[in-house]
Amino acid sequence: MKTENEGFSSTFGAIMAAAGSAVGLGNIWRFPYICGKYGGGAFLVVYIFFVFLIGMTLMMSEFVIGRRTGEGPHRAYSALRPAHPAWRVIGLTGLGTCFLILSVYLIISGWTTNYFWESLVGTLAGIPDDGFAAHFNEFVGNPSRTILFIVIFLVLTTLVIIGGVEKGIERISKLLMPILVVLLLVMCVRSVTLEGASAGLAYLFNPDFSKLTGEGVLAALGQALFSLSVGMGAMVVYGSYLPKDSNILKTSVWIAVCDFAIAILAGIAIFPAVFACGQSPAEGPGLVYQVLPVVFNSFGGVGKIFSIVFFLLLTLAALTSAISLLEALTRWVSNAKRGRTQSAVIMSVLVVILSVLAAFSFGDNAVGRLRFGDMTLFDLLDKLTGTVLPPVCALLTIIFFGWVLKADEIKDELSNHGVHGVSYFKVFYYVLARFVAPVALLVVLISGLLS
Ligand code: PHE
């Protein structure tokens, strides 16, 4: 039950909020790296297929489920099929996944916020090129600073949630998303105008089909789900806030296009600069915290400004994503007695406990020495939230949508109760939702579990 009569004020506001959720660390640091690694343009072809066919199908499903019921994932599934309350399991698994994702997300956001701060006060500018790896290792190995920035970042996130759906989430997304795009464009212009930039563009875009392995195809699907924030119920929550007159198909297309465009722009902002300054692309944290600072320092005096711009951009992108995760969790525990503020605080406290614990994975301490197989606590959470849980939830969601819900119910919601027609409904429902998406998810899941 919605405790307050809340929702987004307009389709534009809803698109900004949902694009805010979608655009995050996944676009800016993860996408460029895996795109280059798995064959550039070759990877892109597969990625486009997954984003616009599988990912968008899921997004539309989650929006339909959310808006039709006006409920978060913990209630929406059973509200649609009251005779079979066991369908709740899908929503609950999704929310559990949101909780775990947020705990990992906070750690990386904490690192990013710290690097923003260190750019601002000039610390990064004073480090020699070969000192960044040691700087990063020392920083993560002694998590007290990480924890400080996790807490600052989480307090900001919580304040937005307490502000409400329209006055908090929608307002901040409408403000931050355009800023983010402008900052990203500034970075792109700088990057492509450097001498030697074309090698970076070639790395990103030239198709190399020999690098597109089975693993690369799996990575493309995992990345598409993660990047669109689908498969864990976050979009069910935003769907429940979607105005009744928003066209779900068009809204989803806009969000997917924004998310995709920003991922590509991030690649254009990063690789040409990396190659132009003679560095080689590294994986994940190494790229952002060890290679890019060297690139910024090579710009001379203005480098400091680009470093500030980049880490600010990354922090803002992470913030609007963390907001959607915390909103889903807040919605879960809020009810007539326990309002938004109290619920948001409870969930923040719970998630920060896990996050802080996992932040100790990098140091020489009891948690750091803990192993699950050969993984640290951080690695375990990262694996669960990166490759295991989202495809499971996505598969369950699409089975419920394609095989349990009736075509008429779905068509009714997509057409806003018959107000407008639904072009391509047959393709969407009978081809994508019932067959292509479930089969693709099943294949990915099985091969992921086998490997
Ligand atoms: N889509 C976000 C990103 O690309 C991550 C995210 C996943 C946010 C799931 C919310 C829900 O970084």
Image (spheres, rainbow, N blue to C red):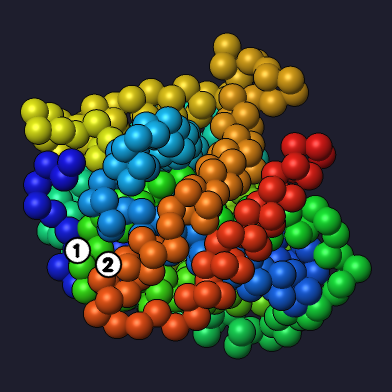
Residue 299 in view of the camera: no
58 displayed left or right of 391: left
Residue 433 x %, y %: 55, 62
Residue 69 x %, y %: 26, 51
Decide: marks 1, 2 in contact (CB < 8 A)? yes
Kind of residue at badge 2: Ala
Q: Nearer the viewer, residue 11 or 401?
A: 401
Structural distance between the alpha carbons of marks 1 and 2: 6 Å
Question: Is 266 located above or below residue 164 in the figure?
Answer: below
Residue 59 x %, y %: 45, 61
**Circle 2 crowding by C-alpha within 10 Å: few under 14, some 14–19, many from 20:** many
Residue 87 in view of the camera: yes
Residue found at the very far top of the displayed protein: 366
Residue in the image at 58% along x and 51% along y: 289
Q: Specify which label sits upstream in the sequence, 1 or 2.
A: 1
Residue found at the very far right of the displayed protein: 210
Residue linked to disc 1 = 8
Query: Which quarter of the figure is the N terminus placed in?
Result: top left
Question: Is 117 located above or below residue 190 in the figure?
Answer: above
Residue in the image at 65% along x and 71% along y: 49
Q: Nearer the viewer, residue 98 or 317?
A: 98
Residue 326 x %, y %: 31, 42
**Circle 1 crowding by C-alpha within 10 Å: few under 14, some 14–19, many from 20:** many
Residue in the image at 40% along x and 79% along y: 422
33 displayed left or right of 433: right
Q: Nearer the viewer, residue 73 or 208?
A: 73
Q: Secondary structure at mark 1?
A: loop
Q: Secondary structure at mark 2?
A: helix
Kind of residue at badge 1: Phe
> Which quadrant holds residue 120?
bottom left
Residue linked to disc 2 = 14
